[in-house]
């Protein structure tokens, strides 16, 4: 065959290329091969390094302290992340540690895809440093299936300068907030900055309102179907949102602006309040409104139900561990050490340094000047007499119901739904489940 | 030719196309149809629930809203785009200065990614910060909810879709006009036909195939509108501006109701195919009449 002088080398390369994927299928772990053990951490942010600096800092510090472990961090936007997890769950190729909604985690647990974290947390001493309600929240049928990824401390960031410029002060009750909205609307100033476009979930303050209208007491009934969302208390809460809307509290482009644009509106001093949480502390701290910004837990209601002096300071969606991690001794050891580090005082301080509240009982050190914005939120959460609900209302339901809750609130804010229609929308979603 | 006339050789040559079609079209469609008959939610094993997802669509007001919006966009787009792009193609055929540059300029929006088109138009149509209201409000005209309200949004989406598609449709018409035989046009001129008569009785009948192709392309593209809605309104307020595809995305991926989402996808497929078939049948009847 003189016409094909490269036949043998080409065949050799082709054979090698065909065999390479087989090598990847090898069962030998990294540790068995002598290299560092790799664990995968999959998150709900496309760029973890910039969008979630707290997690990134913890991973970096963990790797420095544990050179024999390599944490491979990846991330995608929430919808894509969940879609990937869904495919991975079906093919048993889940990442080792990952962020997921609680309701999805419970489905995975039922499908025997998640590791029981109780032994790990006990061995690492993490259980004692987490609030008991948090552990209980991530326990199902005696199995601890998740640990809190970050804290969810939400409220209304308040630009006191905007208020004082119009002769106003931070309100306490709903009636006072209504008066603030009426005054600011006359001056063409936005009272509460919200953005519904591509961020229908950005209604944190109004989720607290649900708790001020008896959500905690109604929760079990709503879950088992013995209580209706169309109850007079919730309808009254929607009526108060409608009153705020009619007073001109929201931006006229609340439908088309995104959450990020709502944040920008506040940072530019164009709104008195921003509906958000501690995650916005960093951006506010870096802006010109930082010296005038305080954190307000929201209004109390004279016609509310139950405790009014509450602040939303709960565990967000959990971090969970794939069951197959338990089959690889080296990987299990690496994950154990990672979780132990994640909830250590050192890592919790890193969280605080990157604008997140600690999720354990750790008392953080704060720089009064450089972290004044975050401090105001943490101070509000530690105020005497203030209590926190067990969870944020949207987090206890399947995603479809959570979306209906967001739609119902924005529906009233945008004058698309009456209070009764808003309540009915959520009830319909509950019925469908 | 003798080699090609063998049946099995023809079959072998067609086989790659059949395999690709089956892999990338038929299989996903059948898979989607299968999923639409389940309660799949992503993380647990799906259960077969028959036609429940389709029945639930009947009671879902947001599905009917998204269907209504899609029909509005379809009617407005086709009614405006086909004659407008045809008129532009006729204009481009005239001897005008810088016709090439003008053609390129008109075709420009067609090569911009729809997500960017949406982003650009948000800054024009947004009721508070948009350019349009910033021009109109100082003239004493009250702030208009071009997008984000519950009445004008589908028309605004149709406008933006038309802006993005007109250059593409015009290019196809222009190519079609270039193919018309000169002798027929000359003969009609010699017979004393005016330009209007020429257009009505010679050009349009000879362009019928091209008009059909452009219409079908526009119809199928309208049924695929997603990015424009996503960028302009995110489907809001409260799903009032969803199209079928954007609502399908919301149900499938945001609400994680994969079975219900696939039922909407099947409806979109059937509606798109039906609309195209009806249009083709009407065009064929017009040709044979």
Image (cartoon, coloured by chain):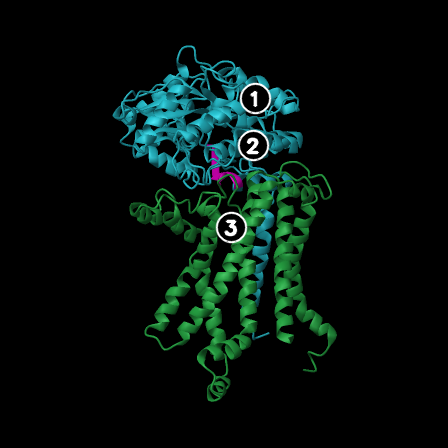
Q: Are marks 1 and 3 in contact (CB under 8 Å)?
A: no
Count of labels in the image: 3
Q: Which label's residue is closer to the chain start, 2 or 1?
A: 1
Seen at 71% across and 70% down, the residue is B11
**Circle 1: is it few (<14), some (14-19), or many (20+) Cα within 10 Å?**
few
Q: Which residue is mark 2?
A: A421
Q: Which residue is mark 3?
A: B226
Residue A78 highlighted magenta (yes or no): yes
Q: Give the number of the mark in front: 3 or 2.
A: 2
Give me the chain letter of mark 2.
Answer: A
Q: Are marks 2 and 1 on the same chain?
A: yes
As helix, strand or loop, the secondary structure at mark 3 comes to loop
The chain displayed green equals B
Q: Which mark is residue B96?
A: none
What is the magenta range? Answer: A68-79
Tell me residue A330's x, y (percent): 56, 31
Left or right: B125, with B177 as reference point: left
Position of residue A66 relative to residue A131, above or below, is below
Residue B266 highlighted magenta (yes or no): no
Q: Which residue is mark 1?
A: A232
Position of residue A398 relative to residue A129, above or below, is below
Q: Measure how far apart labels 1 and 3 are at the Cα level.
A: 38 Å
Q: Measure how far apart labels 2 and 1 are at the Cα level.
A: 13 Å
Tell me residue A130's x, y (percent): 50, 18
Position of residue A134 relative to residue B276, above or below, is above
As helix, strand or loop, the secondary structure at mark 2 comes to helix
The chain displayed cyan equals A
Q: Measure how far apart labels 3 and 2 are at the Cα level.
A: 27 Å
- Quadrant where the C terminus of chain A is found in the figure: top right
The residue closer to the viewer here, A349 or B36, is B36
Left or right: B253, with A58 as reference point: right
């Amino acid at each position: 065959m003189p016409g094909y002088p490269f036949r043998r080398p080409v065949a050799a390369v082709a054979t090698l290329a065909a065999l390479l994927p087989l090598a990847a299928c090898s069962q030998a772990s990294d540790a068995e091969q002598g290299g560092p053990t790799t664990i995968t951490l999959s998150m709900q942010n496309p760029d973890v390094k910039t969008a979630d600096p707290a997690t990134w800092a913890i991973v970096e510090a963990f790797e420095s302290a544990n050179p024999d472990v390599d944490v491979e961090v990846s991330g995608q936007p929430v919808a894509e992340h969940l879609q990937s997890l869904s495919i991975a769950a079906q093919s048993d190729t889940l990442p080792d540690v990952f962020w997921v909604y609680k309701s999805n985690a419970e489905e995975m647990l039922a499908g025997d895809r998640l590791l029981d974290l109780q032994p790990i947390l006990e061995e690492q001493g993490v259980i004692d440093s987490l609030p008991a309600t948090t552990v209980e929240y991530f326990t199902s049928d005696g199995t601890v299936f998740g640990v809190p990824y970050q804290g969810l401390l939400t409220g209304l960031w308040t630009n006191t300068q905007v208020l004082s410029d119009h002769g106003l002060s931070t309100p306490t009750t709903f009636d006072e907030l209504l008066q603030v909205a009426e005054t600011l609307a006359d001056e063409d100033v936005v009272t509460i900055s919200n953005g519904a476009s591509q961020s229908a979930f950005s209604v944190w303050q109004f989720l607290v309102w649900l708790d001020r209208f008896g959500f905690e007491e109604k929760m079990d009934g709503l879950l088992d179907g013995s209580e209706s969302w169309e109850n007079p208390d919730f309808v009254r809460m929607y009526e108060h949102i409608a009153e705020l809307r009619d007073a001109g509290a929201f931006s006229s482009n609340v439908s088309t602006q995104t959450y990020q644009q709502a944040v920008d509106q506040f940072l530019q001093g164009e709104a008195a309040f921003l509906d958000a949480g501690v995650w916005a502390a960093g951006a506010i701290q870096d802006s010109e409104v930082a010296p005038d910004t305080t954190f307000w837990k929201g209004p109390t209601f004279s016609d509310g139900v139950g405790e009014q002096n509450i602040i939303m300071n709960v565990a967000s969606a959990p971090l969970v561990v794939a069951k197959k991690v338990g089959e690889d001794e080296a990987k299990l050891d690496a994950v154990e050490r990672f979780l132990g580090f994640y909830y250590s005082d050192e890592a919790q301080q890193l969280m605080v340094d990157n604008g997140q509240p600690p999720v354990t009982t750790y008392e953080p050190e704060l720089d009064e000047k450089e972290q004044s914005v975050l401090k105001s939120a943490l101070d509000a959460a530690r105020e005497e007499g203030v209590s926190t609900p067990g969870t944020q209302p949207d987090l206890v339901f399947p995603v479809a119901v959570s979306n209906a809750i967001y739609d119902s609130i924005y529906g009233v804010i945008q004058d698309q739904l009456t209070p009764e229609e808003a309540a009915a929308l959520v009830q319909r979603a509950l019925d469908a489940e | 030719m003798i080699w090609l006339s063998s049946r099995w050789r023809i079959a072998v040559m067609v086989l790659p196309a059949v395999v690709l079609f089956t892999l990338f079209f038929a299989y996903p469609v059948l898979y989607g149809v299968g999923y639409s008959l389940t309660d799949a939610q992503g993380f647990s094993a799906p259960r077969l629930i028959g036609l429940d997802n389709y029945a639930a669509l009947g009671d879902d007001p947001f599905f009917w809203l998204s269907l209504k919006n899609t029909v509005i966009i379809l009617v407005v787009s086709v009614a405006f785009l086909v004659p407008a792009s045809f008129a532009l193609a006729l204009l481009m055929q005239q001897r005008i200065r810088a016709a090439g540059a003008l053609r390129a300029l008109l075709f420009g929006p067609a090569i911009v990614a729809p997500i960017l088109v949406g982003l650009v138009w948000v800054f024009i149509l947004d009721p508070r910060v948009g350019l349009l209201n910033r021009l109109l409000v100082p003239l004493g005209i009250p702030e208009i909810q071009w997008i984000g309200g519950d009445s004008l949004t589908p028309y605004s989406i149709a406008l933006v879709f038309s802006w993005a598609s007109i250059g593409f449709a015009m290019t196809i018409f222009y190519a079609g006009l270039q193919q018309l035989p000169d002798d027929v046009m000359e003969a009609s001129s010699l017979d004393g036909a005016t330009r209007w008569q020429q257009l009505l009785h010679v050009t349009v009948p000879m362009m019928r195939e091209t008009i059909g192709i452009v219409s079908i392309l526009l119809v199928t593209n309208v049924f695929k509108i997603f990015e424009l809605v996503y960028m302009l309104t995110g489907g809001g307020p409260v799903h009032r501006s969803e199209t079928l595809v954007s609502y399908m995305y919301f149900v499938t991926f945001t609400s994680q109701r994969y079975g219900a989402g696939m039922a909407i996808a099947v409806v979109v497929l059937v509606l798109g195919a039906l609309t195209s078939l009806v249009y083709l049948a009407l065009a064929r009847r017009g040709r044979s009449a």
